[in-house]
Image (cartoon, rainbow, N blue to C red):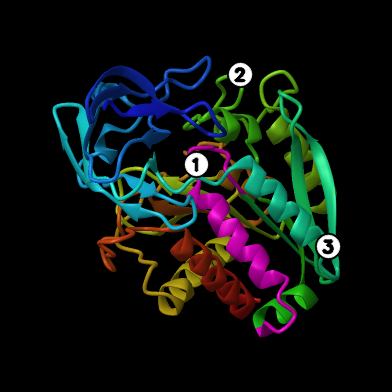
Amino acid sequence: MTISINAAFDSGNIVVESLAGTTARLSIRKDRESDFYQWFHFRVACTAGDALELAIAGLGDSAYPDGWPGYAAAASYDRDHWFRLDTSYEAGTLTIRHTAEGSLLWIAYFAPYSMERHHDLIASVAECDGVSHRCLGTSLEGQPIDCIEMGTGDTQVWLYARQHPGESMAEWWMEGALEKLTDPADPHARSLRQKCRFHIVPNMNPDGSRRGHLRTNYAGVNLNREWNDPTPERSPEVLCVRNAMDESGVDWAMDVHGDEAIPAVFLAGFEGIPSLKAGQTEKFLAFQTALAANTPDFQTELGYESSAPGQANMTMSTTQLAERFGAVSMTLEMPFKDNRDLSDPVQGWSPERSKLLAHACLATLDQML
């Protein structure tokens, strides 16, 4: 019997080039109106015991070719527990091998976070005491940009994720953050809700998320290059969030992402902005140091190069908010690969660890404030 492969579902992305028995040759569909491609998500219908060999070709020209060496694909039989598969990479082809243990296997670049799960999250959190919901605007395809708000303090904190829709670990982080902040028994959450007013946008790019994009919205626009001049035609998702930020002000902000190549959790800051203030830098570095002390999943050795003075890219949210509001803003990056310093050969970096990292970030913020 020949296996079958399908990706016609929420966040699905794969092109079947050929099938023969239990082997397949595949490729990844580019983001709409864009040359970006790296995210994949598909299901395999097979027979228990099948020796699957799935080759995804053409990856030398993908968005981040350095992301493939040392990477292992994520998989699940129940779409709840995700584990890693035997994966190798050579000459632009990622080859996944697995002996099937059931009749349906889902395979993805990282454990997906569906739009249906997003709506379940919004619905459940909106029912919690002291929580309000508002729709900041809509995406190009008309999907809501949901914002959850809570807290009675004066410190304005913005948490937002999935500007790049393929970085699904970012919304797993958001689920963990919202679970912690709405836990009435959690002392950090209680303290933070007294000190802060939280504005939380779990998914800034619902169109790209549903379409199985890596990095862009419906128009093929990278939202994290739109913050200097967002428009209704190209980036209404950014425009409505930035307008809401202008109304509230921003004291602290975290933009949550995933990095394809670096096997670690790290922060990026705003050191190159034109109006950099000493206090901003000191608070950012203090947060970074405290987070490293609070969780061994975070480190400061690996990360991006710092921008030279006055040379920050002001189209990105972290630098735009630091300059616009004098905020302590930061980009949090989690790995698609395993965490180099605390590896897990079964799951690699996972939804569960993403959620626990959110707990550590919020506990650290409480300490800082």
Q: Is residue 65 left or right of residue 369?
A: left
Regarding residue 325, the answer to whether it shows in the image is no
Q: Nearer the viewer, residue 32 or 310?
A: 32
**Which quarter of the rendering shows the N terminus?**
top left
**Left or right of residue 350: residue 141:** right
Q: Which mark is residue 310?
A: 1
Against 201, is 60 above or below? above
- Viewer-proximal residue, 352 or 274? 352
Q: Which tag, 2 or 1, sits closer to the chain's start?
A: 2
Q: Magenta segment: does it hold 170?
A: yes
Q: Are marks 3 and 2 in contact (CB under 8 Å)?
A: no
Give the residue at x 30% y 23%. Answer: 26
- Tell me which residue sits at (46%, 28%) in the image: 7
Magenta-tinted stretch = 161-187
* Residue kind at label 1, given as amino acid type: Gly
Note whether residue 310 is visible: yes
Q: Position of residue 245 (x, y in %)?
A: 77, 47
Q: How far is the residue under mark 3 from the one under mark 2?
A: 34 Å
Q: Nearer the viewer, residue 115 or 242?
A: 115
- In the rendered structure, which amino acid carries the disc numbered 3? Glu
Q: Residue furthest left?
A: 90
Do residues under tags 2 and 1 come within 8 Å of each other at their CB atoms?
A: no
Q: Nearer the viewer, mark 3 or mark 1?
A: 3
Q: CA distance from mark 2 to mark 1?
A: 31 Å
Q: Earlier in the sequence, mark 3 or mark 1?
A: 3
The span from disc 3 to disc 1 (Cα, nearest Å) is: 44 Å
The numbered mark, 3 or 2, whose residue comes first in the sequence reads 3
Viewport quadrant of the C terminus: bottom right
Q: Nearer the viewer, mark 2 or mark 1?
A: 2
Q: Which mark is residue 219?
A: 2
Mark drawn on residue 38: none
